[in-house]
């Protein structure tokens, strides 16, 4: 069974990789396509629309991709990356406004369980709800 793939877009590769490591801890014994597009080629801070586009394509198994981003310009880079994709892949990619870490963890758990793209995206968006409820 192919699953919804995830892409983490961050200005910092170490930050993105740490978030993915944390999310994978919630998936013992389960595999899930989580691609990272983060930082610059020389190890600096930044985003690259071409790298993001490649990550989107790599994460796509045909059931869709949910993309989580860290900061505003990462959103702009992800939007540009969409334009670089073939139409059929682009239609399966959803950019999530959810929080990077909390959203990624929730999205990873439901994606690994076989949820569809819209359910995975909804879970990512709900990522802050427990913290908001606790601190309200």
Image (cartoon, helix red, strand yellow):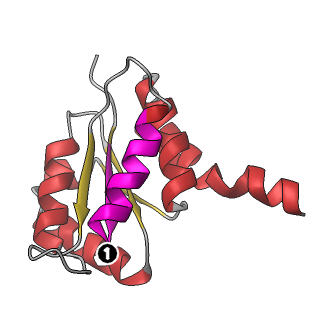
Residue on which disc 1 sits: 11
Quadrant in which the C terminus is drawn: bottom right
Tell me which corner region of the image, top left, top right, bottom left or bottom right, holds residue 54: bottom left
The residue closer to the viewer here, 39 or 120, is: 39
Give how far across and how far down residue 83 sits, in percent: 17, 70
Asked which secondary structure carries label 1, the reply is: loop
Query: What secondary structure characterizes most of the magenta part?
Result: helix
Residue at the location (45% across, 27% down)? 27
Residue range in magenta is 6-24
- Res 49 visible: yes
**Residue 7, horizontal then vertical, whole percent:** 30, 52
Q: Is residue 56 magenta?
A: no
Q: In the picture provided, is 64 more to the left or to the right than 126?
A: left
- Identify which residue is drawn at 30% across, 41% down: 64
Q: Residue furthest right?
A: 136
**Residue 65 coordinates in the image, percent (x, y):** 31, 46
**Crowdedness of circle 1 by 10 Å Cα count: few (<14), some, many (20+)?**
many
Residue 118 makes an appearance in the image: no
């Amino acid at each position: 069974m192919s699953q919804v793939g995830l892409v983490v877009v961050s200005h910092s590769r170490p930050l993105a990789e740490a978030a993915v490591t944390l999310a994978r801890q919630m998936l013992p014994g389960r595999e899930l396509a989580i691609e990272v597009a983060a930082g610059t080629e020389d190890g600096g801070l930044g985003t690259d629309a071409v790298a993001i586009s490649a990550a989107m394509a790599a994460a796509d198994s045909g059931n869709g991709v949910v993309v989580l981003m860290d900061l505003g310009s990462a959103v702009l880079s992800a939007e540009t990356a969409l334009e670089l994709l073939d139409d059929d892949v682009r239609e399966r990619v959803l950019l999530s406004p959810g929080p990077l870490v909390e959203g990624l963890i929730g999205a990873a758990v439901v994606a690994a369980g076989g949820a569809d793209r819209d359910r995975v995206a909804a879970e990512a968006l709900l990522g802050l709800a427990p913290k908001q409820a606790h601190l309200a």
